[in-house]
């Protein structure tokens, strides 16, 4: 029986992935800050799910938390680096530093530290790392510089990690979705549900389950195949072209 370690399992893509992997016969260690959500998921998914209360900013406790995993969950075949967030949409010249630090600490520093802490187990199992990046890693948009930069880091980090892991059998993939209706926009907008609803209105966004299904597909490919990066969008999302500033 394989084990997936899924960060940010208390909502959205992480939660959908936890359900998908348990339904597929895996054990899942799901992390999050919200104990009550982890407990609810444990109640739903049963003994195959282990909820681990973990804050991605708390890099100093990662090693001890991993060491303390209960017996059936001690091997890790897949790390799904899903936890992440975006700061409020704002030009950098108008942004507060605090929310930017939170995003960099979570999306970049926490992700690197957790990956490093789990690598011995992943190497032992010839496992896989799947990182949640974004289309924002490739296509910039106004107000998203720090978010896009963090997701470009995630993609390039994964490619570099593949080089480091050459010969180990460990696979590394960057999943790069566009618009997925989850709590992502709600968090980005500081809890404004109407703004989130308006963004996804009448455009048939992707769902957390769509992305979880894709992650499952990547994770269960034959072990000699590595998907380096996979970009997904809803059919209704495309590009608006370059902005041009004219003089006079
Ligand atoms: C977020 C993707 O297209 O909603 O990762 O900005 S998008």
Image: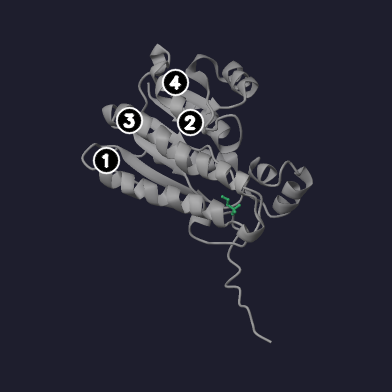
Residue 29 sits above or below residue 129 on the image: above
Residue 41 sits above or below residue 115 on the image: above
Gap between marks 2 and 4 measured at Cα: 14 Å
Query: Where residue 6 is drawn, which disc sits there?
Result: 2
Tell which circle, 4 or 3, labels the residue nearer the N-terminal end.
4
Gap between marks 2 and 3 measured at Cα: 13 Å
Gap between marks 1 and 4 measured at Cα: 24 Å
Q: Mark 3 near ligand 1 (CB under 8 Å)? A: no
- Residue corresponding to mark 3: 122
Tell which circle, 2 or 4, labels the residue nearer the N-terminal end.
2
Comparing marks 1 and 4, which lies closer to the viewer?
4
Tell which circle, 1 or 2, labels the residue nearer the N-terminal end.
2
Can residue 171 be seen in the rendering of this structure?
yes
Marks 2/4 in contact by CB < 8 Å: the verdict is no
Q: Secondary structure at mark 3?
A: helix
- Report which quarter residue 93 is drawn in: bottom right
- Residue corresponding to mark 1: 165
Q: Residue at x 57, y 31 (%)?
A: 15
Query: Where residue 238 is drawn, which disc sits there?
Result: none
Q: Secondary structure at mark 2?
A: strand
Gap between marks 1 and 3 measured at Cα: 10 Å
Gap between marks 1 and 2 measured at Cα: 20 Å
Tell which circle, 1 or 4, labels the residue nearer the N-terminal end.
4
Q: Specify few, some or many for label 2: CA neighbours under 10 Å numbering under 14, 14-19, or 20 or more.
A: many
Q: Specify few, some or many for label 4: CA neighbours under 10 Å numbering under 14, 14-19, or 20 or more.
A: few
Gap between marks 4 and 3 measured at Cα: 16 Å
- Residue corresponding to mark 4: 65
């Amino acid at each position: 029986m394989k084990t997936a370690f899924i960060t940010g399992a208390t909502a959205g893509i992480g939660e959908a992935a936890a359900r998908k992997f348990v339904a597929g016969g895996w054990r899942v260690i799901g992390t999050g800050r919200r104990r009550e959500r982890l407990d609810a998921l444990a109640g739903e998914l049963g003994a195959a799910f282990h909820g681990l209360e973990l804050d991605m900013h708390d890099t100093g406790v990662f090693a001890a938390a991993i060491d303390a995993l209960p017996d059936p969950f001690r091997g890790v075949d897949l790390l799904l680096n899903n936890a992440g967030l975006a700061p409020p949409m704002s030009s950098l010249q108008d942004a507060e530093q605090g929310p930017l630090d939170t995003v960099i600490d979570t999306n970049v520093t926490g992700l690197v530290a957790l990956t490093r802490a789990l690598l011995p187990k992943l190497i032992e199992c010839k496992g896989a790392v799947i990182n949640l990046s974004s289309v924002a890693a490739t296509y910039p948009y106004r107000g998203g510089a720090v978010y896009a930069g963090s997701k470009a880091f995630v993609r390039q980090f994964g490619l570099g990690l593949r080089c480091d892991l050459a010969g180990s059998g460990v696979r590394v993939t960057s999943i790069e979705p566009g618009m997925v209706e989850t709590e992502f926009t709600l968090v980005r907008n500081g809890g404004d549900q109407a703004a989130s609803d308006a963004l996804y209105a009448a455009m048939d966004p992707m769902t957390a389950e769509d992305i979880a299904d894709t992650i499952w597909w990547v994770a269960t490919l034959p072990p000699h195949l590595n998907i380096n990066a996979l970009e997904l969008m809803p059919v209704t999302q495309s590009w608006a072209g370059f902005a041009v500033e004219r003089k006079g």
